[in-house]
């Protein structure tokens, strides 16, 4: 609050003026995390508790949430924390949520693809989205559960069936791909990582992850075609790199919690009317014909998606990558839609 404004509020001496000012500057926002006791859920709960934009933090899981909620609730930050466990408490966990983050579901083990998680996670996501449609149909949904290329279309179909679908409010979280692309680019180009930006488009599995290093900033001419090829492959295989290093103990959790917190923060800022909030995300899209969902840069605002941005100029290598990803992404999207409409 500027000192002039503060003085004028105090001069009016009105408690309601002070209340209305503070509620305008940091509105009350409820964030719910579904799968909050898991490998991603726990550090994500911690990071959301540290976010001053959150006033109420609702932690839901089928098991283990009381302990996580009690633990996180002792941190002396704004958000009031509540833990919910088992399906009968899901409605209470969701009621009034502005943003729902979903990292519920099984992670990969070495040798598996994200699509191998479909059989278990599709049903989990369907159940949770059915509850979202019932208890907080207006909420922004951040889908982390894999395979994102299919779970986002599943969520869309569930919401359509319930009559609550708003394409501006459904996001597949692909921020970890951007986080990785930035880190790997900064390392190779030997530039400070804090200032690096790299858009990542397409989807969130293997070759459907398409980093656009030709648009990376700061630009560099230190990297040749082979470097770009290697950076692209490392970004596409980033998840597998972690799965293999964890050797059977799951997939990325800490970097994912960071990425999930970055994306949720962007959604909250958008809701609060902060201008020029742009992140890559897997959303309903018309950017590529034949692909009803696609990750690209998205401008976030008070209603969720304000604008899905185009791809910008691509290098020949990126154009090839874009052509190569289309069949896999199309079939993953269709698989999700088929599951949700037929089950
Ligand atoms: N979008 C992305 O970039 C990334 C996505 N993931 C995905 O996130 C998901 C979670 O991964 P982790 O946290 O490592 O797994 P985890 O197994 O450690 O945690 C999952 C949590 O979900 C809970 N859960 C299961 N069914 C549930 C239900 N019906 N309702 C509420 N909670 C339920 C479990 O009890 C568990 O606590 C996986 O599908 C993984 O593939 C992981 C990393 C990156
Ligand atoms: O690779 C996985 O299974 C988890 C994930 O989506 C990632 O780390 O990008």
Image (spheres, rainbow, N blue to C red):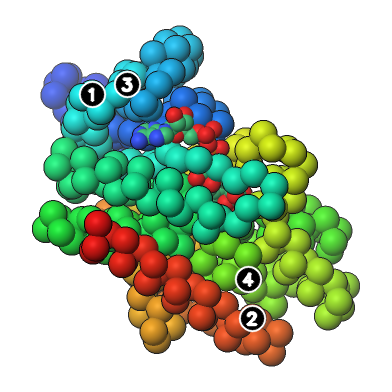
Residue under label 4 = 207
Is residue 43 left or right of 187 when viewed as pictured?
left
Label 4 sits on a secondary structure element that is helix
Is residue 141 left or right of 231 when viewed as pictured?
left
Disc on res. 89:
1
Residue 143 in the image: state x and y as whole percent: 40, 50
Q: Circle 1: is it few (<14), some (14-19), or many (20+) Cα within 10 Å?
A: some
Identify the residue at image location x=70%, y=59%: 237
Identify the residue at image location x=31%, y=67%: 338
Identify the residue at image location x=39%, y=56%: 151
Residue under label 3 = 85
Q: Circle 3: is it few (<14), some (14-19), or many (20+) Cα within 10 Å?
A: many
Q: CA distance from mark 3 to mark 1?
A: 6 Å
- Nearer the observer, 150 or 18: 150
Residue 325, image quadrant: bottom right
Mark 2 vs 1: CB contact within 8 A: no
Q: Is mark 2 within 8 Å of ligand 2?
A: no
Report the number of discs. Answer: 4
Residue 304 in view = no
Mark 3 or 2: the one toward you: 3
Residue 120 in the image: state x and y as whole percent: 43, 46
Label 3 sits on a secondary structure element that is strand
Q: CA distance from mark 3 to mark 4?
A: 37 Å
Mark 3 vs 1: CB contact within 8 A: yes
The earlier-in-sequence mark between 3 and 4 is 3
The earlier-in-sequence mark between 3 and 2 is 3
Q: Is residue 113 above or below residue 92?
A: below
Mark 2 vs 4: CB contact within 8 A: yes
Identify the residue at image location x=57%, y=70%: 208
Disc on res. 321:
2
Label 1 sits on a secondary structure element that is helix
Residue 62 in the image: state x and y as whole percent: 36, 26
């Amino acid at each position: 609050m500027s000192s002039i404004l503060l003085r004028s509020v105090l001069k009016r001496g009105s408690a309601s003026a002070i209340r209305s000012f503070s509620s305008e500057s940091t509105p009350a926002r409820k964030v719910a995390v579904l799968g909050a006791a898991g490998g991603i859920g726990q550090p994500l709960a911690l990071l959301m508790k540290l976010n001053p934009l959150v006033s109420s933090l609702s932690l839901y899981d089928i098991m283990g949430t009381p302990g996580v909620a009690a633990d996180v609730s002792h941190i002396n930050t704004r958000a009031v924390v509540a833990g919910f466990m088992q399906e009968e408490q899901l409605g209470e966990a969701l009621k009034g949520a502005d943003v729902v983050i979903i990292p519920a579901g099984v992670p990969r083990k070495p040798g598996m693809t994200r699509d191998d998680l479909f059989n278990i996670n599709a049903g989990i996501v369907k159940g949770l989205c059915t509850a979202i449609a019932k208890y907080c149909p207006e909420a922004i949904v951040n889908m982390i559960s894999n395979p994102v290329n299919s779970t986002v279309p599943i969520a869309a179909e569930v919401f359509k069936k319930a009559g609550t679908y708003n394409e501006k409010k459904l996001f597949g979280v692909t921020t970890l791909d951007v986080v990785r692309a930035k880190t790997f680019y900064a390392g190779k180009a030997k530039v400070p990582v804090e200032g690096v930006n790299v858009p990542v488009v397409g989807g969130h599995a293997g070759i459907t992850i398409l980093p656009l290093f030709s648009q990376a900033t700061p630009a560099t001419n230190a990297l040749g075609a082979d470097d770009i090829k290697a950076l692209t492959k490392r970004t596409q295989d980033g998840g597998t790199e972690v799965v293999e290093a964890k050797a059977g103990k799951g997939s990325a959790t800490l970097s994912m919690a960071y990425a999930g917190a970055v994306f949720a923060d962007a959604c909250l800022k958008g809701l609060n009317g902060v201008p020029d909030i742009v992140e890559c995300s897997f959303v309903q899209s018309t950017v590529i014909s034949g692909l009803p969902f696609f990750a690209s840069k998205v401008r976030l605002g008070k209603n969720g998606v304000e604008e899905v941005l185009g791809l910008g100029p691509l290098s020949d290598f990126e154009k090839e990558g874009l052509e190569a990803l289309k069949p896999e992404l199309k079939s993953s999207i269709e698989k999700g839609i088929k599951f949700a409409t037929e089950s």
